[in-house]
Image (tube, helix red, strand yellow):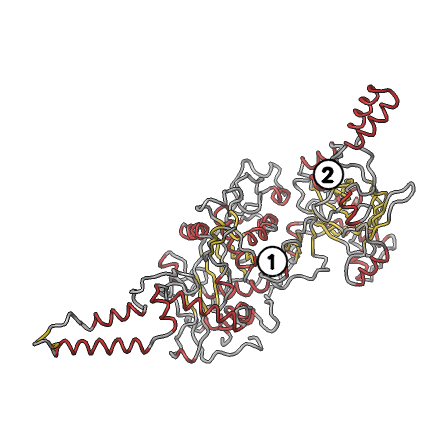
Amino acid sequence: VGGDLPAPARRPSLLVPLRASSVDTDGDGTSAASKSEGAQSFDLTTAMFCGALAFDAYAEPAANSTRWERGSRGMNVAFLSPAYTRSLYAGLVQFTPLRCVDLPDEEDTAEAVMTGGGVDAYLSVGIVEGQWEEDVRVLEKEAYHNGVRDLRGCAHVGRSATAWSNVNKNKAKANMKKGESGAYHIPSGWGKGGQAVWEDDQPFYLYVQDPSEARLVFSVIDDDMIGEGDVIGSASRRLTDLFPEAKEKDSVQMMKNLVLQKIKSGEIDVKNGMDLAKGVVQEWEGDVKLTNKPRKKDKKGQITTAAIAGAAVAGPVGAAVGGLMASMYEGDVRGKIDLKLRYLPIPNVSVEREKYRPKGGLPGLNWSDLYERHLDEVRATLPPGAPAPRIEADDAEFCFFVNHDETGCACAVYRSLEKKMIVISFRGTCVPKDIVTDASIVQEAWVEGEDVKDEGVAKVHAGFRNSLNSIVRRLKELVLAAVAPGEDLSDYDVLVTGHSLGAALATLFTADIAEYGMDAGRSLPQLEPGEPWWSGLASAFNKGNNGGIFSGPPPPPRPKSLKMYNFGSPRVGNDAFVAKFQSLMDDGSIDEAYRIVNGEDIVTRGPRTMNGAFLGKISYEHAAPTVLINPPSEEEGGEDDQSVLWVEGESSDRDCPVRDGVALTSPLAEGNLLGDLVKSVQEAGVEAPKSIDGLPSVFDLGKITAAAQKVGGRLQSLTADDLPTVLGIDKKYTEREVRMIQSIFSGQALSHHMEDECELPHYCGSF
């Protein structure tokens, strides 16, 4: 399949390692073993399908694509499926800020020293949909507010680059040559404020659900090197004030009217296809004056100044009056934004869903071909004419991709409406930020607010939790919207997958959904009550519903089934978390869960349990059964039915070889050197010597001779691994630790973790 993948020396079957066949023979998604035993059973077809999408998540959409919705706090979404986007949104607005004038100077002395005397301005824009009455009240009734920052129901927020006050026009041109932002600052002068200029910067985009009721909220914010900065001023405009045609509920009819108007006015040539396409785009250019500002945080300076001035005029009474008036003065709202807007209606019409083929992350390794070859292998084991079971359908589509600028967390979501299936694939370690996330070993409570010092509390890797927490609420909102109109998440099967860091995130996400449902009212589990789970998608749920969204508070929806197949996963939590995860598997909240690993992959052996002087005891254990892949080798011998897959709890009763196990054991235990020597003597039947005339009997000498032969044979097979057992150190534990150390020093520790080495493709390449 991949040009650089070595072919196995022989062709082992991957379909025979389980106690019962895990192949879905009737195409309903349930394996024969699980039907007969009522328990989960590893399914190779599902694993191959998930593997394709686990590595496909590494292929992030192009950064300059118009599909990206850039959030104000580092949260970004690329909408990749036209069908999905059309079902959720009715329009797309492009924002191109030009400049902001009459800006005040920086009031924070420390910030002024670091970035210059002027404010470091950027433009933040949010879209408020009509049903958010609380947000509408703030915009229409409150004189002082923080604009975009005070919006509770606004899920769609975009921003420009920051025009740092220590960047002038010449430095901005140099930045542009390096591919960076061309934004710069013009200092204030006599009688006029400073300016922020966004010269030739890329536009940003926001999607609209209901254009006829949508409001655009503009906030100019003073960015800070440390902290989130302060709002300078805000303004809001109805979308229909800028684009009157957006009042038309029927977007198709609106597009027809626009084109006809432009044909009549001569703006477009009816014979020119490009002109006709541009005819549906509406444009607006102008300025927006800031009309609102937050209340001043610190008025001590102006109160003191006014009191001194009042005292000079009217003594103590004047000082009191001056101080009182100053305490009530909030200052004037300053600032005006010049910008260009474009509005593109998105007609809600049916579009043909072109089947998406996973690409994988490594050039030369085609997961789609590998999956098809696997299905051919399965088909060969079925009765003549029987179709191979497929996980996906011809309408499989890549819906959207989510990432976060600060944490680096990323996730891809796919769906099949025909199969009623949603796949959530978390990207693994890809950027330097991910390495920082991986490297941490500190733990925090799985449920925010629980006492992390309590030994019985479920605790997880702090880096993994913080990373997932940065995107998971928006992710759950968008997953809820991925179902077909009129359907519910309870009609859908959900598959969760990921590789490396992505596998760890997949484990945490699966645990959250299994226990609490798809709760989009909060991020990860917390003791504090969250908002209603449906809040972020109120308008999407409320379309055509005149009676309100819900008559009562429904619980967060749960999928029809929840399965997780991850690849090369590190350990994510302590024993209490693993016990919680296992309980969710036992009670059926998680239908299937497996962690597929290469036995030589060092990443899957960490983080390690340890005792630290400062951090205390930190314990880590694996969650979900292990599926171990061992490379086929001629040295092992055996026939074609030699399996390269071992599934914990299904293939055999032996312990999982990639778990730490118990380090200490009895020196006399079976398999240990002393234990084997004692057993050899006991099996030979040697008893206390009997003497005849002071000499050992011939019978006893024979037993002693037999025992000596067995002891000699055992000593001939003596290895270095036997020596620690004399001290009571488990032999299997020693073997695992030695292999891990050898892997580190040989330089193969990470190579076994890569896409072409760590899991299925390397060992399925002969199919």
SS for tag 2? loop
SS for tag 1? helix
Tag shown at residue 146 = 2
The location of residue 222, given as percent across then percent down, is 76, 45
Is 321 above or below relative to 138? above
Mark 1: give few (<14), some (14-19) or many (20+) Cα within 10 Å.
few
Mark 2: give few (<14), some (14-19) or many (20+) Cα within 10 Å.
many
Q: Residue at x 44, y 46 (%)?
A: 455
Q: CA distance from mark 1 to mark 2?
A: 33 Å
Q: Is residue 42 visible?
A: yes
- Residue 375 or 575: which is nearer the viewer? 575
| Residue on which the image places disc 1 | 436
- Residue 349 or 116: which is nearer the viewer? 116
Tag shown at residue 595 = none
For badge 1, the amino acid type reads Val
Q: Who comes first in sequence, dot 1 or dot 2?
A: 2
Question: Left of 669 or right of it: where is 169?
Answer: right
Q: Residue at x 44, y 62 (%)?
A: 626
For badge 2, the amino acid type reads Asn
